[in-house]
Image (cartoon, rainbow, N blue to C red):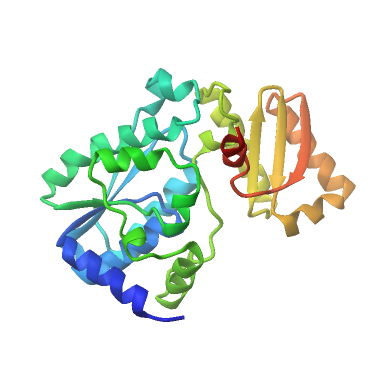
Amino acid sequence: MSQEKLQHLKTILRNYESVLVAFSGGIDSTFVLKVARDVLGRDLAKAVTAESESVPERELEDAKKLARGFDVEHKIIRTEEMGDSNYRSNPVNRCYFCKTELYDQLLPIADEWNLKTICNGTNLDDLSDHRPGLNAATEHGIKSPLVEAALTKNEIREFARQIGIPIWDKPAAPCLSSRFPYGYEITPEKLKQVETGENFLKDLGFKIIRLRHFGAKARLELGQEEFIRLMDVGLRSQVSDFICSLGFKVVVFEPYQSGRLNQEVSRS
């Protein structure tokens, strides 16, 4: 793979002069943070991660570990998107309200740290998906260096592998609220059901997991290759019993399909 795009990304970040990275701990924002740290140095590349009911505790701890490993100044902030009825009602533009809450908080932090540019981990592939949070980024002047460098997800993973980022092959891990079909109300209690259920599956060794919350019904989606494990009747029963113990009445199993709920929005 050509190194030109990686060099272009470094040039973009260098031209930003100093950056505050909206750092989720996923591969995209991790890649931006690592390259920014390498190019700009510790004083000019810092990170902020949001903590809220919609962020899995494991993801937050992973982000802290990565930031320490990169020797980056890292701030955890509490975001209150759950206090917004627009967010809780879970409309198709739910992410807009979440990102607005986040970016509203990042602007004064960037000023406090005297950092000129706030950037996120949006990549080129994201532009073809249903991403209402992009509107919030535009309104707040947030930069997307991966888009500017025309980097796709696969290219980001490969470059991340090359420069030694340990999570280069980490599965995507969107916020817990993405497990709810649009229009289903989101509550802290329901988010905890999802997180607890997914943690149970992770402890069993599953990597690609989505516990979709349909009120009394749980739709458990697992990676195509991992789905085969459920042919084991004992394991399937163990999983089903645990998910029902969380308060669900029905559990169905399906192979995971990326962007499934957003595809339904696009067709509507």
In the image: residue 103, left or right of residue 231: left
In the image, 267: left or right of 160? right
* In this view, 250 is above or below 69: above
**Residue depicted at 57% across the width and 40% down the height:** 262
Q: Find residue 35 and report its horizontal and vertical position in percent.
A: 31, 68
Question: Looking at the image, is 203 positioned above or below residue 245?
Answer: below
Where, by quadrant of the figure, is residue 39 drawn? bottom left
Where residue 86 sits: x, y (%)?
42, 21
Note whether residue 78 is visible: no
Query: Is residue 221 or residue 94 the one in the foreground?
Result: 94
Q: Is residue 130 above or below residue 33?
A: above
Q: Residue furthest right?
A: 233
Residue 60 % position (x, y)? 42, 46
Identity of the residue furthest to the bottom in this view: 2
Q: Residue at x 39, y 39 (%)?
A: 133
The outermost residue toward the front is 267
Write down the quadrant of residue 226 in the picture.
bottom right
Residue toward you, 68 or 28: 28
Spot occupied by residue 52 in the image (x, y as percentages of width and height): 41, 34
